[in-house]
Image (cartoon, helix red, strand yellow):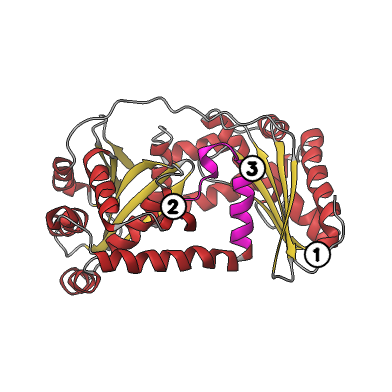
């Protein structure tokens, strides 16, 4: 499915087989370490770059190319990606599409500055966006439990930025930060289209010359503190209970086992948590487990009544213990594998899904094909899943509930 470049220049180019699609997809991102001191600048950059000459650029993309383009920030584990994308019909010459994308990226350098009014306006918009994140209680609770579970590591840093850091960012400092990114940051470029266009795509490398040293990826050491219990309040009727666990993701085989464990525990409607807590006990409105991409964490979340928090938490831990001691039937294990394989088989039907999957593999230094990934799932045995369950360590129990409630939970 993917043709991966063999070398590690500063600009790495990945060609994905997209011959069956009607459109070409171009995705270029600057691969940045997620740091507290730069997270807000990067988030603001995306907003400013997207709005620089917005009307003119959007009109050009639509009229000349029939294309959709965007600038965004994506968090992947402890990486923050400043992402430029363009999707257009294959009737548009690849050279023209790449030229359009390059101009969007490099134009600020030609102008020598960012527009002061644009920066000021986008700061205000980003501020409102960050303030508005608290209105989505499910997303807010997920963000908070990740911060607490990953405390002391870069995984805990928000890729959306921080309100308190906005004030000190000016158009000049933001411009200098972007110039530094253009000159030094690692670049990953994905092209999902016809393989015959390879030579045209590779020409993009000339814009970002140089090489970067191959760095062995080191897992950040997790603090060895016991589970913490946190409660916060907000204007809401339904409470959200979340539990954060550290997990073993040392290699691809163990990641596959964790992936399967997540599916069996709470990743599907026939999972243990859904059947035991929602269907049998009727304790929650919803319950599921999920993995944070490119991180060593598994989370369980449930929508509950506040008075059911303690009982629900105990049942989650009981379900994990059940998997450790009893495992699962061969039928359930095979059904889980089939469900995962069916979901990932669909990656080849979406150019965006292909780019997202391979982005995570490349960032982890594991440029796997989906076929190899699914073979790992197929080879995972019950003992591997049980071993993954035994490596789960509860780190945080987090409850977000209404302000007027006070049931004295411990």
The residue pinned by badge 1 equals 305
Considering only order in the chain, which callout, 2 or 1, is on the residue closer to the N terminus? 1
Considering only order in the chain, which callout, 3 or 2, is on the residue closer to the N terminus? 3
Q: Quadrant of the N terminus?
A: top left
Residue 151 placed where, x, y %? 60, 40
Question: Seen in the image, is 32 located left or right of residue 372?
Answer: left
Residue 9 placed where, x, y %? 23, 32
Considering only order in the chain, which callout, 1 or 3, is on the residue closer to the N terminus? 3
Q: Which mark is residue 347?
A: 2
Give the spatial CA distance, label 1 vs label 2: 37 Å
**Residue, x 51% and y 36% (percent of image)?**
375
Quarter of the figure with residue 33: top left
Q: Is residue 6 above or below residue 315?
A: above
The residue pinned by badge 3 equals 149
Asked if residue 290 shows in the view, the reply is no
| Mark 3 neighbour density, 10 Å: few (under 14) some (14–19) many (20 or more) | many
Helix, strand or loop at label 1? It is loop
Frontmost of labels 3 and 1 is: 3
**Residue, x 87% and y 56% (percent of image)?**
408
Quarter of the figure with residue 44: bottom left
Range of magenta residues? 138-161
**Residue, x 42% and y 48% (percent of image)?**
39
Choose between 230 and 306: the one closer to the eye. Answer: 230
| Mark 1 neighbour density, 10 Å: few (under 14) some (14–19) many (20 or more) | some
Asked if residue 376 shows in the view, the reply is yes
Q: Is residue 294 within the magenta segment?
A: no
Helix, strand or loop at label 3? It is helix
Residue 401 placed where, x, y %? 74, 63
Give the spatial CA distance, label 3 vs label 1: 23 Å
Residue 148 placed where, x, y %? 64, 45
């Amino acid at each position: 499915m993917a043709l991966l470049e063999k070398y590690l220049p500063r600009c790495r180019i990945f060609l994905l087989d997209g011959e069956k699609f009607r459109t070409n997809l171009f995705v270029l991102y600057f691969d940045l370490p997620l740091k507290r001191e730069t997270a807000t600048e990067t988030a603001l950059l995306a907003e400013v770059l997207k709005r620089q000459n917005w009307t003119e650029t959007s009109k050009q993309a639509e009229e000349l190319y029939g294309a959709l383009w965007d600038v965004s920030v994506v968090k992947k584990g402890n990486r923050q990606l400043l992402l430029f994308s363009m999707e257009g019909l294959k009737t548009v010459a690849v050279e023209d599409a790449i030229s359009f994308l390059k101009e969007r990226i490099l134009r600020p350098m030609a102008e020598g500055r960012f527009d002061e009014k644009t920066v000021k306006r986008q700061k205000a918009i980003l501020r409102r966006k960050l303030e508005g994140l608290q209105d989505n209680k499910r997303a807010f609770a997920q963000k908070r439990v990740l911060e607490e579970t990953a405390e002391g590591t870069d995984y805990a840093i928000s890729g959306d930025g921080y309100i308190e850091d906005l004030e000190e960012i000016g158009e000049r400092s933001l411009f200098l930060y972007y110039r530094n990114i253009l000159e030094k940051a690692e670049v990953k470029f994905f092209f999902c289209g016809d393989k015959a266009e390879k030579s045209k795509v590779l020409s993009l490398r000339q814009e970002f010359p140089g090489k970067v040293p191959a760095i062995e990826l080191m897992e950040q050491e997790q603090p060895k503190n016991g589970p913490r219990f946190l409660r916060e309040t907000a204007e809401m009727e339904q409470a959200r209970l979340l539990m954060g666990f550290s997990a073993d993701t040392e290699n691809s085989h163990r990641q596959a086992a964790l992936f399967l464990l997540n599916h069996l525990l709470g990743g599907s409607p026939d999972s243990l948590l859904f059947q035991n807590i929602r269907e049998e006990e009727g304790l929650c409105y919803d319950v599921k487990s999920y993995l944070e991409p490119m991180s060593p964490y598994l989370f369980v979340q449930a929508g509950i009544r506040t008075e059911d928090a303690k009982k629900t938490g105990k049942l989650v831990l009981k379900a994990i213990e059940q998997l450790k001691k009893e495992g699962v039937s061969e039928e359930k294990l095979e059904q889980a594998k089939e469900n995962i394989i069916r979901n990932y088989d669909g990656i080849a039907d979406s150019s965006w899904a292909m780019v997202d999957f391979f982005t995570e593999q490349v960032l982890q230094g594991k440029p796997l094909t989906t076929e190899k990934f699914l073979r790992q799932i197929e080879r995972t045995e019950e003992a591997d899943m049980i071993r993954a369950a035994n490596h789960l360590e509860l780190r945080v129990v987090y409850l977000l509930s209404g302000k007027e409630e006070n049931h004295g939970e411990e």
